[in-house]
Image (spheres, coloured by chain):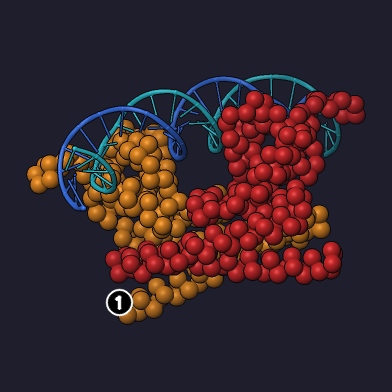
Chain colours: A red, B orange, C blue, D cyan
Amino acid sequence: MKASRTSSLGYALLGLLQQQPASGYELRKVFSAAAMKTYSDSPGAIYPALERLEQQGLIHGSVEKGAGLRRRRIFRLTPSGLAELRKWVARPVTPEELVRNQEEIFLRFAFSEGVAGPASARVVLQSLQAALKTHLPALREEFERVQATASVSGRLAFAYGIRSYECLLKWTHQAIAAYEKKGKRGAP
Amino acid sequence: MKASRTSSLGYALLGLLQQQPASGYELRKVFSAAAMKTYSDSPGAIYPALERLEQQGLIHGSVEKGAGLRRRRIFRLTPSGLAELRKWVARPVTPEELVRNQEEIFLRFAFSEGVAGPASARVVLQSLQAALKTHLPALREEFERVQATASVSGRLAFAYGIRSYECLLKWTHQAIAAYEKKGKRGAP
DNA sequence: TATGACATGTAATCTGTTACATGATTAG
DNA sequence: CTAATCATGTAACAGATTACATGTCATA
């Protein structure tokens, strides 16, 4: 009834189902749109993932009756599923995750507001910023060390690696600023 | 003797071995450095991957004798392995790959110069640029469509998705410029 | 009536993760 | 002598990819 930890795709499904109940097919369509193309929209990925979530009690699917009559199962988040989502959103961002699983950090941030409110979205941003501030200096230092030995293309690729994190850091500042402004207007 | 296509990790190994022969342990150390942390440095990933490459005839490992005496296998690229690397480097960048496998594009670029010369590095950059120029407008269009329905954090996350590709596009311009300058100096 | 979109699934295969296991060599 | 590092592997398991299989409904 639990044991195995939920994968990135699993959380993507939970997050989408938190926004609104949906069938497997509808979820697949979301994943085939440009914004979520990083996740597979193939049935061989989605349906087994939904099954796992249901077996863990995080979602529940019920066959839709009435109207169209073609059988489809509508999945809904269970209370336990919502709790799991909340725990996930609150996870601190580690430098490790920044490198190996950036995609999931953004997923977390994108869903954070709907799952746990604007305050939690800001917490994610601050956590991300902190991770960047430990990772970037380490990367820059390694760049200096290795620079001499690499080819031009190797150096350029490494430089982009650093740049992309700088770009991300800049974005976190702006995103935090956006939330601060909104906070003043909305809840004074 | 062939069949299964080489994975991202496989090409990373081939690329490193093209630079110089190395043992599994040495390769693991490269993957544990910040620049290549995206790949696993665990023995359960590296050693089986090396085995697969050897079975495909792309590399060859020989037990080092002399000196230290602790047994270690030094792997070398075979001619067939070099050919495979060249083919890989020459692969055009697809928008699909841009989204699902960006990491591998950079790997390809980083190794391109050493494997097939500066001209091929420029080809990779141009191919990447072309892919960006079809993907970015599609992303922007979807952003406009979806914007109204999403939460603030959802919109900010999407906006970063677009931004990071813009940042990448900008970098390709600079990288191409760097190669053009170098071309004039080196080979007139 | 045939095509395409809707809708759900299964099976084979491959790869990576995690964790364990083993042993040689060097530095303190 | 003992801890750390060098060095290589294996085994169980989870998850994704690909391809196949099946059937409904609307529409041209």
Q: Residue at the spot x=70%, y=29% of the render?
A: A57
Horizontal side, residue B60 vs residue A26: left or right:
left
Q: Chain of mark 1?
A: B
Q: Residue at the spot x=48%, y=65% of the render?
A: A136
Q: Is residue A154 visible?
A: yes
Q: Nearer the viewer, residue A147 or A82?
A: A82
Q: Residue furthest right?
A: A67
Quadrant in the picture for the N terminus of chain A: top right
Quarter occupied by residue A139: bottom left
Q: Is residue A40 visible?
A: no
User: Given the image, on which type of amino acid does mark 1 rest?
Assistant: Gly
Quarter occupied by residue B2: top left
Horizontal side, residue B72 vs residue B151: left or right:
left
Residue D7 position within the rendered picture, expressed as x and y whole percent measured from the top left? 24, 42
Q: Residue at the spot x=63%, y=65% of the render?
A: A172
Q: 10 Å neighbourhood of mark 1: few (<14), some, or many (≥20)?
A: few
Residue B137 position within the rendered picture, expressed as x and y whole percent measured from the top left? 66, 62
Give the number of callouts. Answer: 1
- Badge 1 is on which residue? B186
Q: Residue at the spot x=69%, y=42% of the render?
A: A85
Q: Is residue A86 above or below residue A158?
A: above
Residue A9 position within the rendered picture, expressed as x and y whole percent measured from the top left? 62, 40
Q: Is residue A9 above or below residue D10?
A: below
